[in-house]
Image (tube, coloured by chain):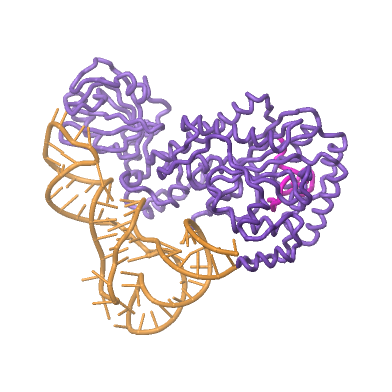
Chain colours: A purple, B orange
Amino acid sequence: MSNEQPPASSIEDDLPEQLRIRREKRAGLIERGIEPYPVAVARTASLSEIRAKYASLETDTATGDIQSLTGRVIFKRDTGKLCFATLREGDGTELQAMLSLDKVGQETLDSWKSDIDLGDIVSVTGEIITSKRGELSILANSYAMAAKSLRPLPNDHKPMSEETRVRMRYVDLIVRPEARSNARLRPAVMKSLRETFSAENFIEVETPMLQVMHGGAAARPFKSFSNAYDMDLFLRIAPELFLKRCVVGGIERVFEINRNFRNEGADSSHSPEFAMIESYQAYGDWRSIADLTRSLVQNAAMAIAGSHVVTHHDGRQADLGGKWKEISLYEAISQGVGETVTALTPIDDLKKIATKLGMKVDPKWITGKLAEEIFEHVAKDQLIEPTFVMGFPVDTSPLVRAHRELPGVAEKWDLYVDGFELATGYSELIDPVVQRDRLIEQATLGSKGDLEAMQVDEDFLRAMEFAMPPTGGMGMGVDRLLMALTGLGIRETILFPLVKPEIE
RNA sequence: GGGCCUAUAGCUCAGUCGGUAGAGCAACGGACUUUUAAUCCGUGGGUCGACGGUUCGAGCCCGUCUGGGCCCA
């Protein structure tokens, strides 16, 4: 509780007109003994319950059913002796309230007109009727303020700018139907994912987000500090190394859905914090885990769209059904550049190809990284329908086992949908000696200035030395799954994306 | 990292050639017992993102910075 408040006058003087007037109305209510924020108001049913109960009531009908309903006032039409208002509740259901002089009396009608503003939350008690125009309504005997809004709602007829929507999602949720449905889409997808995992006997675990070592992906971490332990801690960039410890311990089918943090740029498909699914299946491999991934995506589509064909917010349809296309990374590169490229193609040849394509080549890129960049340059945009890109370079995949036939290639796929990377999957590297060599190689890159390189996690290696069974593993971005299902940008799939503070 | 666009009333946006700041919704006052983006009459509301410059004069031209968006790498 704060006792120190600046003098009320200094606040009020600076406020814009509409905010000042609403604060004055709040003060006026208190002065007249009316609580603008009561501890409780009458409510006997939700608006949607009333809508369902009287789904087909004839025009100009009185039901005799007395109810107390609550909602936010989003439209107000005051006439001399009969006032109309539209109430809206959280899921977007609306119902009309009517206040007539002969039911509520002059005093109540006047207070309704002067005290109630757009945005206020009210409780109305009265009979459920239909108006002469057929609108299902509650004809008030009385009303009560449930909560006074001190800020005016934005114009309900013009969409808010993208920035305002993100900065004030609470207002976005009040005024924009799509914001409400998007907010409910995500939990529906999460539920579906967990059901799919459960049906396949996968167990959900939670592993550390604050980590002593960061690992499991190529990314720059957020760094923090523990006062109690007097040491640096990192926000995790991936849960991979802990989930593999689970598999060593005998949790043969394991998954985690939780937040990762990467200290990198933000754009329409990257957020500094993002939800990620990771899953490991003992005695599986990159193909079995690809099947699981497809089930997860297709079941999620079914859960929210009732079909494997999903309709994006702009009306475009995307077919996520059936068995998905597979292409080989190096074949795609070869086709894209018009000459044969394999994992054994020397880096100097790759550099020539990249230069010919007009790409800017970072001299720090290793051979595999350059091949991946060339792939993204020539093929990425064409991967609209779901496509598994199979066989990534082994030198950029330090946690993946080598391909059982192709030299220089790892048993790793990336799943592309709509031109972006949705998921990745491996046959996991389980030889602890090879794993150590790979991590030491990474640490060497790190010491040469590769900020995304992995660290040598000795405890992880010790776990591996206790023997991990042959395993398939996958990771999929939840926000990106939402993007693939809806066509929305990442900032629309996340309820409260990071925004820089407003300047005062 | 580079380029382009953008910031004006509570919200969404106009603002011509550099010459007193505009609209719709919202607000305020009034009329109206079947409205539903109600209607009609009237009124008020602005640090034009911030700082600097050019100019007799800047929302507008120039520079720097900040926020937002898009494209490229």
Residue A161 visible here = yes
| Quarter of the figure with residue A156 | top left
Residue shown at the point (34%, 24%) measured from the top left: A69
Which one is in front, B13 or A335?
Answer: A335
Q: Quadrant of the N terminus of chain A?
A: top right
Q: Is residue A212 left or right of residue A362?
A: right
Which one is in front, A84 or A331?
Answer: A331
Q: Is residue A44 left or right of residue A129?
A: right
| Quarter of the figure with residue A201 | top right
Residue A360 percent across, percent down from the top left: 64, 66
Residue A218 percent across, percent down from the top left: 71, 51
Residue A325 percent across, percent down from the top left: 59, 42
Residue shown at the point (52%, 42%) measured from the top left: A484
From this view, report whether residue A451 is shown above or below residue A118: below
The stretch in magenta equals A207-233
Q: Is residue A175 left or right of residue A105?
A: right
Which one is in front, A77 or A370?
Answer: A370
Q: How many numbered discs sit on the rendered protein?
A: 0
Residue A349: within the magenta?
no
Residue shown at the point (82%, 45%) measured from the top left: A457
From this view, report whether residue A45 is shown above or below residue B64: above
Residue A213: within the magenta?
yes
Residue A90 percent across, percent down from the top left: 41, 32
Residue A504 visible here = no
